[in-house]
């Protein structure tokens, strides 16, 4: 029987810190792919502007046309032949979770932080023009969580509820070493390594 690849999926609210968790796991030997990268590739192929609305819309369209698993399927197939474990950033739908559970040795980590903390981070990093308007951030955050979204759409809130582990990234830090999130990720990864061997 083929040994299934160890895959960690990351779901989380906007600006919660998924990228930081990815970088910590990469330092532990993981390869990484973001579902957002796959969506952006699709936008470029279609000659569309890379805006948050277009990303959300095209992600939904791909899931509707090809099944809810399509983004996760593309991510896994891209890296299935490599021996290194894989972290997939930006899980937003339970069909993606179910597909990865069926096709890999999969664990889902949720990353969250209070709204005000995340809004502060968006302003501080000043790199996503789409989110710098407070009202727009509220709307995009609600949509991302699943508000007024179809079941095959953005469902981050549902994914957080079903995560195997939840990381609360509510503290800012100067250095990643010895930071609260570094410790949380290391603790979670140790537990994943134990469970992966069972």
Image: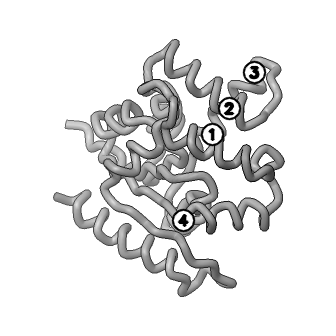
The nearer-to-camera label among 1 and 4 is 4
Pick whichever of labels 2 and 4 is earlier in the sequence: 2
The way the protein has been coloured in the rendering is one colour
Q: Which mark is residue 114?
A: 4
Query: Is residue 80 left or right of 124 when viewed as pictured?
Result: left
Q: Measured along the vertical axis of the image, is residue 100 above or below residue 122? A: above
Query: Is residue 100 left or right of 125 when viewed as pictured?
Result: left
Query: Is residue 90 left or right of 5 when viewed as pictured?
Result: right
- Secondary element at image label 3: helix
Residue 142 rendering spot, x and y as whole percentages: 56, 43
Where does label 1 land, which residue?
Answer: 36
Instruction: Decide which of 115, 167 is in the foreground and name it.
Output: 115
Where does label 2 land, which residue?
Answer: 55
Quadrant occupied by the N terminus: top left
Quarter of the rendering containing residue 144: top right
Q: Measured along the vertical axis of the image, is residue 58 above or below residue 134? A: above
Q: Which mark is residue 45?
A: 3
């Amino acid at each position: 029987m083929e040994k299934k690849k160890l895959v960690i999926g990351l779901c989380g609210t906007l600006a919660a810190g998924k990228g930081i968790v990815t970088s910590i796991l990469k330092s532990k030997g993981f390869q990484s792919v973001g579902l957002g990268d796959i969506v952006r590739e699709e936008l470029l192929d279609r000659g569309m502007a890379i805006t948050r609305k277009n990303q959300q819309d095209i992600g939904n369209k791909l899931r509707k046309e090809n099944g809810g698993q399509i983004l996760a399927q593309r991510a896994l197939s891209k890296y299935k032949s490599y021996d290194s474990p894989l972290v997939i950033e930006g899980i937003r739908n339970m069909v993606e979770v179910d597909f990865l559970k069926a096709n890999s040795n999969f664990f889902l980590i949720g990353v969250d932080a209070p709204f005000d903390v995340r809004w502060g981070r968006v302003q501080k990093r000043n790199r996503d023009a789409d989110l710098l308007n407070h009202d727009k951030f509220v709307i995009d955050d609600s949509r991302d969580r699943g508000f007024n979204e179809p079941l095959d759409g953005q469902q981050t809130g549902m994914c957080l509820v079903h995560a195997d582990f939840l990381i609360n990234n509510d503290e800012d830090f100067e250095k990643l070493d010895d930071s609260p999130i570094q410790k949380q990720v290391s603790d979670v990864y140790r537990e994943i390594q134990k469970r992966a061997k069972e």
